[in-house]
Image (spheres, rainbow, N blue to C red):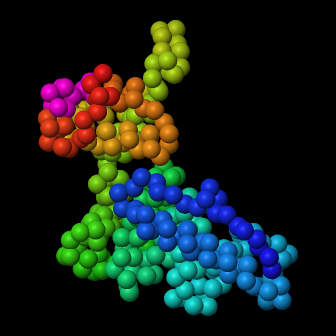
Amino acid sequence: MDVGDQELPGGGLTRAGGVFESDELIARVNRAMRAMWSRLDSLPCTDPFWSRTNRRPTWYKVQQLADDCLAQDMSDEVARWALIGFEMHAGSFSGLQLIAEEAAVRDEALHDLIAVAEWVWLEVGVDPAAYPDLERALQQVGQARLSALRGPGGHLERAAVAGSAFLHGMSFAEAIGRQRWDLFLHALIVPGPDECTSSAEGSTLPSAESQQLARARECLRNDVTAVVDLIDAAHWWAAYRQTDVSYRLGELLEAVPRDAIQRLVDRGLIAPNRALFP
């Protein structure tokens, strides 16, 4: 069966701007999805797999083949990661269960679990708590396993701490240490005055968005180091969504004394940037 030169949509998955993801993880997923296309390509037209189909290669069929391969051999990592990649591409948390199954034999699987959950969260914009997948996956890993991985330190401990925090009811953003970042991420795209709906009394912001801006300003006033998260969120919009949020960034920075921002620059917590001081 000649599948031909199949390209992954958009050239494959790319980084989403997470703090747990890595180039290696994204490359592993893309390699696995391409490898499954190669397997489909290598199947002769007489293979029993095609007897259930119209013999036309599609993304559905390559996913079906990956399902079959993993059912036949649970150690088939190509099939496993191809399926995880298909779920990531669909913006689904369903692939997390496949990673949880590895956690008993591979410590790095826990970090992969949090990284993939974060990737989907950033792409979809929905807290994983809205779906049962991450909670079920972490429950399968188990608290004992999470506790055991908190000792070594480094990236595995960060993942274990995040997993435990999520199971204890924290939002995903809070569990991975990005609660302030997430607050600013949304505050930065509250529309400016010229984008607001007009009324007889002039332009106004919807109450929910006004409250969001108020919370962001309060956060900045309470802890000046929150500026680090604000700048990082603004950079995310520019790098991963090609969106200019400089107007709202400048407005939010007005909540922080300029000398306090300069001290953060002097300490190396944020890079010098003329955009901060118009």
x%, y% of residue 66? 63, 79
Circle count? 0
Instruction: Tell me if residue 238 comes above or below residue 37 in the rendering.
Output: above
Instruction: Tell me if residue 154 comes above or below residue 238 in the rendering.
Output: below
x%, y% of residue 153? 20, 71
**Looking at the figure, which quarter contains the C terminus?**
top left
* Residue 261 lies in the magenta stretch: yes
Q: Residue at x 29, y 54 (%)?
A: 177
Relative to residue 120, is residue 70 drawn left or right?
right
Q: Residue at x 44, y 44 (%)?
A: 239
Relative to residue 264, is residue 196 drawn left or right?
right
Q: Visible in this render: residue 223?
A: no
* Residue 12 lies in the magenta stretch: no
x%, y% of residue 125? 48, 49
- Where residue 270 sits, quadrant-wise, is top left
Please report the bounds of the magenta region as a residue range.
252-262
Q: Visible in this render: residue 50?
A: yes
Q: Residue at x 64, y 59 (%)?
A: 9
Q: Residue furthest top?
A: 200
Q: Residue at x 45, y 23 (%)?
A: 192
Magenta segment's dominant SS is helix
Instruction: Tell me if residue 270 comes above or below residue 119 in the rendering.
Output: above
**Of residues 5 and 61, which is closer to you in this image?**
5
x%, y% of residue 158? 27, 66
Relative to residue 233, is residue 260 drawn left or right?
left
- Where residue 150 sits, quadrant-wise, is bottom left
